[in-house]
Image: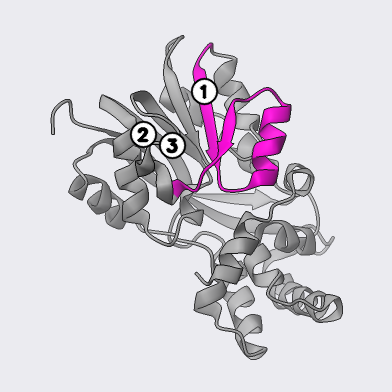
């Protein structure tokens, strides 16, 4: 990812996310049941966003620390009473967020950590205590495939490098299993599944909220609006119904993996 795309990736609006992408948390609510934390566990919420999922952990009397690369999202989390700090997931191994966690929990975040997924896994291992676990859900191969393709095609048509702008890492189940096992984790549960999702608002709102590295590559407002409009029109025949309601073809990877008691 280019430096400009990386910056856009962190330039979130917590208000826009809550309005146009709140379903990302709602549809993964049962991921907390996969974690099944007993009271008092220390949990690192990796990619905590505005802290909405962290609050669900706090309600279970869990000691939560949230980390996110977006200062705006961390500020929103702190306003909700979530202990959170700005930290890129690639930098977990620095120990800035502490170590000895019973679990690392992550929803809809790992697919944004494209630069070096193996470094992220290594960082997760570093912050976990021996025998600790990671419980995560994120985008898998095929996730939002037509949306990603349209964003890339319209960017390339305007002379941009789509590979540099594309912020997402959507692995196969086999690929991510191999990465975890190569890092020394044992897989306790892993599954990939489709989650067709009705969007709460227009596709343009989804794009400006969740595809910012593409959208913000166009610095002139008129050019940006034209780009979003053309992406929307590419997608309309496939993803909008006759009443103008939009859906997105989400594909998710969910897992529980455990760090060994001894390395």
Residue 67 location (% of width, % of height): 53, 37
Mark 2–mark 1 distance (CA, rounded to whole Å): 14 Å
Q: Is residue 162 above or below residue 123?
A: below
| Number of the front mark, 2 or 1 | 1
Q: How many marks?
A: 3
| CB atoms of marks 3 and 1 within 8 Å | no
Name the residue at 75% across, 78% down. 227
* Res 64 label: 1
Return the residue nearer the eye: 237 or 234: 234
Residue 87 location (% of width, % of height): 51, 43
Residue identifier under label 3: 96
Mark 3–mark 1 distance (CA, rounded to whole Å): 15 Å
Tell me where the magenta segment starts and ends, as one range. Answer: 61-89
Mark 3–mark 2 distance (CA, rounded to whole Å): 18 Å
Return the residue nearer the eye: 229 or 160: 160
As drawn, the residue found furthest toward the left would be: 263
Q: Residues within 10 Å of mark 1 (few under 14, many from 20)?
A: many
Return the residue nearer the eye: 136 or 146: 136
Q: Secondary structure at mark 3?
A: loop
Instruction: Choose the circle earlier in sequence order: 3 or 1.
Output: 1
Q: Is residue 194 above or below residue 63?
A: below
| CB atoms of marks 3 and 2 within 8 Å | no
Horizontal relation, residue 52 to residue 222: left or right: left
Rendering quarter of residue 234: bottom right
Instruction: Choose the circle earlier in sequence order: 2 or 1.
Output: 1
Residue 84 on the magenta segment: yes
Residue 211 on the magenta segment: no
Q: Secondary structure at mark 1?
A: strand
Residue 50 location (% of width, % of height): 67, 37
Q: Quadrant of the C terminus?
A: top left
* Res 134 label: 2
Residue 57 location (% of width, % of height): 55, 21
């Amino acid at each position: 990812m280019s430096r400009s795309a990386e910056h856009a990736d962190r330039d979130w609006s917590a208000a826009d996310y809550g309005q146009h992408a709140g379903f990302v948390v709602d549809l993964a609510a049962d991921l907390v049941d996969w974690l099944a934390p007993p009271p008092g566990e220390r949990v690192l919420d990796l990619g905590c966003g505005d802290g909405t999922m962290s609050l669900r952990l706090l309600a279970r009397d869990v000691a939560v620390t949230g980390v996110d690369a977006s200062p705006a999202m961390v500020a929103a989390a702190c306003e909700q009473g979530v202990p959170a700090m700005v930290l890129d997931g690639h930098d977990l191994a620095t120990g800035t967020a502490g170590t000895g966690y019973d679990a690392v929990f992550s929803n809809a975040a790992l697919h944004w950590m494209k630069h070096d997924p193996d470094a992220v896994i290594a960082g997760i291992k570093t912050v976990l205590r021996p025998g600790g676990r990671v419980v995560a859900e994120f985008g898998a191969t095929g996730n939002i495939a037509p949306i990603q393709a349209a964003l890339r095609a319209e960017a390339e048509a305007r002379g941009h490098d789509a590979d540099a702008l594309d912020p997402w890492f959507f692995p196969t189940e086999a690929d991510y299993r191999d990465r975890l096992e190569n890092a020394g984790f044992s897989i306790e549960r892993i599954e990939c599944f489709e989650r067709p999702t009705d969007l709460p608002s227009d596709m343009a709102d989804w794009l400006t909220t969740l595809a910012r590295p593409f959208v913000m590559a166009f610095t002139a407002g008129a050019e940006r609006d034209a780009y979003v409009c053309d992406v929307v029109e590419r997608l309309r025949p496939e993803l909008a119904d006759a009443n103008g309601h939009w859906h997105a073809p989400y594909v998710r990877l969910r897992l529980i993996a455990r760090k060994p008691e001894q390395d």
